[in-house]
Image (cartoon, rainbow, N blue to C red):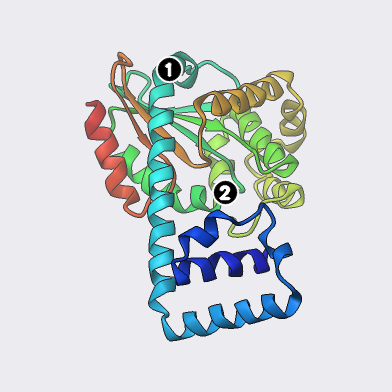
């Protein structure tokens, strides 16, 4: 791969379009090892003498990534109306419903405890909910980080049976490192004074939770979501929609913008 990239770079540098057009599918095979090494040396020396080329390449790649993300966001926004009833279903298993049950605004949040961005955005989201009492919040667990993520999701979902969701959820989000099964068990034990561990473990085996999480995976796939966290806003009538696709650079501002768009 390195040799191939060097070959491509040297063609760009020399601006030899005709030569590039005649390249075979595996151009490196057309050169001897000494020739390849000479190409590598030329490319290296050129980049050292002209470091602005690397900056230009980096800028171009960044522009391409921004364009790709815009396309993905547009696809998600196009999909939301098709699946609005599933997204904003307050009775489906595998999710937690908080905030104003009669709120004019509904926010669906796809999340998981193993996601560092989800942990970083949590205080900002909580602030938004606190400052806007007309919001109903639906937390949809999408634990694609594996069995550890599924286990912790089941734990907080089961904690609802004892009205201890928020206590366990906050304890989970307070963990800086990856929350594996052992860490989840340790967190549960740390709040034994307010939660019945035996009942919690039994409730975690509820088949509805398993079904709910599977449905969440399918919904995320149908929407073509990029990852967690993802925030989807709508009005009570579900006629307006807005999206915040993750921990964006201006996350707090984007939340406010999304809220205004559906009011």
Cα distance between the residues tagged 2 and 1 = 25 Å
Is 193 left, or right, of 67 in this rendering?
Answer: right
Q: Which of marks 2 and 1 is nearer the N terminus?
A: 1
User: What percent of the width, then of the height, locates residue 190?
Assistant: 67, 51
Could you say which is closer to the camera, residue 60 or residue 138?
60
Which residue is labeled 1 in the image? 84
Q: Could you say where residue 2 lies in the image, as x and y percent from the top left? A: 66, 68
Q: In which quarter of the image is the N terminus?
A: bottom right
Examine the image and state in which quarter residue 33 appears: bottom right
Looking at the image, which residue is at 37% across and 54% down? 63
Q: Which mark is residue 122?
A: none
In this rendering, is residue 218 above or below 225?
Answer: above
- State whether residue 158 is above or below residue 86: below
Q: Is residue 23 shown left or right of residue 237?
A: right
Q: Position of residue 90 (x, y in %)?
A: 48, 18
User: What residue do we see at 43% from left, 65% from top?
Assistant: 57
**Residue 196 sits in quarter:** top right
* Mark 1 Cα shell of 10 Å, populated few (<14), some (14-19), many (≥20): some
Label tally: 2
Residue 58: quarter of image: bottom left
35 relative position to 101: left or right = right
């Amino acid at each position: 791969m390195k040799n191939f990239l060097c070959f491509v770079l040297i063609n760009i540098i020399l601006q030899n379009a005709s030569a590039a057009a005649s390249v075979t599918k595996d151009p490196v095979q057309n050169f001897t090892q000494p020739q390849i090494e000479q190409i590598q040396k030329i490319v290296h020396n050129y980049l050292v003498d002209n470091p602005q080329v690397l900056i230009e390449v980096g800028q171009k790649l960044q522009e391409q990534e921004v364009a790709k993300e815009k396309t993905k966001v547009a696809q998600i926004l196009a999909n939301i109306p098709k699946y609005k009833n599933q997204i904003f279903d307050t009775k489906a298993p595998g999710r937690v419903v908080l905030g104003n049950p009669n709120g004019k605004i509904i926010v669906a949040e796809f999340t998981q405890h193993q996601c560092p961005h989800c942990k970083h955005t949590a205080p900002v989201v909580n602030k938004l909910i606190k400052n806007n009492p007309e919001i109903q919040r639906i937390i949809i667990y999408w634990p694609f980080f594996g069995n550890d993520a599924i286990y912790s999701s089941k734990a907080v979902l089961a904690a609802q049976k004892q009205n201890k969701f928020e206590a366990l959820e906050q304890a989970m989000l307070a963990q800086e490192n990856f929350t594996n099964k052992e860490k989840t068990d340790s967190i549960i034990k740390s709040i034994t004074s307010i939660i019945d561990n035996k009942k919690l473990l039994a409730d975690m085996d509820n088949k509805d939770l398993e079904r709910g999480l599977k449905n969440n995976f399918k919904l995320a796939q149908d929407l073509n979501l990029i990852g967690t966290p993802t925030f989807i806003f709508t009005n009570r009538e579900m006629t307006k929609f807005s999206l915040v696709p993750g921990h964006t650079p201006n996350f707090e501002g984007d939340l406010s913008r999304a809220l205004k768009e559906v009011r």
